[in-house]
Amino acid sequence: MNKKNVINISALIESRDSSTGKHVFRVSRYTKLIVAEMKKLGYYSDILTKNYIKELVKFASLHDIGKIFIPDSILTKPDKLTEEEFEIMKRHTQLGGEIVLSLIGKRQREMAYNIVVYHHEKWNGKGYPMGLSGEETPLCARIVAIADVFDAISADRCYRKAMPLEECFDIIERGIGSDFDPIAAEAFLEAREEAERVHTEFSDKEVQNASD
């Protein structure tokens, strides 16, 4: 699947929730920053090949594709979700995995599937859908998880306003070794200046411009 097709699929998410539209592109950019910093620091050199990085950055945009099956009443609810609603929301990971299996060719399927299904797992095993811990979660998903959380808290959402950037970086730092892979999280913090530029550059631009 080429980049254009991935962008077209990601646009389906935007049609459900305008805030998510920009979100998927920023997550892709933050993912690129993290993996570039990890490679520069010499981590996972056997995994972080040129092709792996290319596919990781491309498929990061698909991480929330399963949300197209989540009811609007939950996806755009302006208040905190009930426990029952949150259980429904959590299904977007596995629903997204089913989409990947049906749309993406076998050669590229593993990377996309791992990102979509496991990007809400946590380093301490308290995430979902499987409760994986540490390196049980695929590396690609551990990286996207940081990009996803940072963008979720640093941008306006239907249920709350964006947090100040200083607080957002503090949340990532406090989550090292509990919520987040320590190496990937430290790499993101090392790339803080670049992350701030991504946040500014894509905050008010149209999604289509962000895909160029």
Image (spheres, helix red, strand yellow):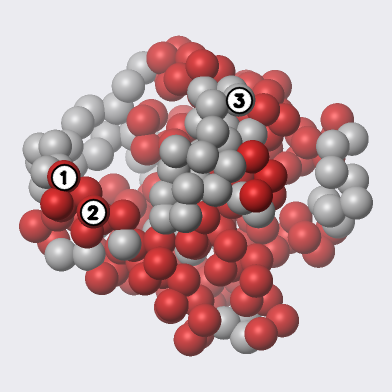
| 160, 74: nearer the viewer | 74
Residues packed near mark 2 inside 10 Å, few (<14), some (14 to 19) or many (20 plus): few
Quarter holding residue 65: bottom left
Where residue 37 appears, as percent x and y from the top left, is: 76, 34
Q: What residue lies at 46% left-to-right and 33% top-to-bottom? A: 150
Which residue is labeled 2 in the image? 87
Q: CA distance from mark 3 to mark 2?
A: 25 Å
Up-down relation of residue 84 to residue 100 (above or below): above
Q: Residue, x 55% and y 18% (percent of image)?
A: 173
Cβ atoms under marks 1 and 2 closer than 8 Å: yes
The residue lying at 69 percent from left, 44 percent from top is 135
Q: Residue at x 86, y 30 (%)?
A: 41
- The span from disc 3 to disc 1 (Cα, nearest Å) is 26 Å
Query: Which residue is label 1 attached to?
Result: 83
Q: Which residue is mark 3?
A: 177
Q: CA distance from mark 1 to mark 2?
A: 6 Å
| Residue 18 shows up from this direction | no
